[in-house]
Image (cartoon, grey):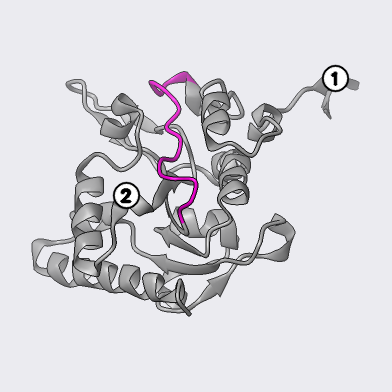
Amino acid sequence: MVNFSCRGYSLPVTTTSAADYIPDTRELSALGEAAMDCRGCGLYRDANQTVFGAGPSSASMVLVGEQPGDQEDRAGRPFVGPAGRLLDKALVAAGIDRDLLYVTNAVKHFKFKQAQRGKRRIHQTPSRTEVVSCRPWLLAELGVLNPGVVVLMGATAAKSLLGSDFRLTAHRGEVLHLPDDLGLAKPACVATAHPSSILRDPPTQREDAFDALACDLRFAATLLSA
């Protein structure tokens, strides 16, 4: 509860976040069900549905993206659109079985604006407020999974856990660790590009960017046995 001052009067304003909707559970399925009713930020109003993480509870590696896209919002599953297909190719190139991974996003609802013409929905980057508001879901997922390695794909995912000052280009290829104040165990973290950014690259740069993503994923996998 915060106070909002208006013309000399102090009016109580109730604020919410995802934390208000998270049940006391160690079951991913129960978390996923509860997330469907989350109203922790305003993104739920326009999105079709919450897109929670997917993968086995035994996963030792977690991949974290930014947010679901158009196709993910329609399907209700993460990384099933163009970026997901490119990620699948990169995982194959890195020798990693996606079925053994847990894949999720920093933000669980699709943020977009409607195209002026037609029905196309254009991706919009989540604000810092929206990322922070949704972060309790991601922390709950990681708390249940207790993975050995977390791969943060893109700046939004990296900043959601490592702070707003984090710069992906300055720390790519390093072994990183989560801040103590998140209250989690200390998985090894690797920051890399989001697959969607590779799709936006000029064709002449796309192959090198893809190879760099596959290399980062391969490096992350080696940390599991380190």
User: Picture coordinates of residue 194 (x, y %)?
Assistant: 33, 57
Q: Nearer the viewer, residue 17 or 31?
A: 31
Name the secondary structure under disc 2: helix
| Residue bearing the label numbered 1 | 11
The mark tally for this picture is 2
- Mark closest to the chain's N terminus, 1 or 2: 1
- Left/right placement of residue 165 relative to residue 217 reads right
| Residue bearing the label numbered 2 | 99
- Left/right placement of residue 182 relative to residue 189 reads right
User: Picture coordinates of residue 152 (x, y %)?
Assistant: 44, 60
User: Picture coordinates of residue 190 (x, y %)?
Assistant: 45, 69
Amino acid identity at mark 2: Asp
- Left/right placement of residue 220 relative to residue 146 reads left
Determine if residue 164 is in view: no
Name the secondary structure under disc 1: strand
Question: Does the magenta-highlighted stretch encompass residue 208?
Answer: no
Q: Nearer the viewer, mark 1 or mark 2?
A: 2
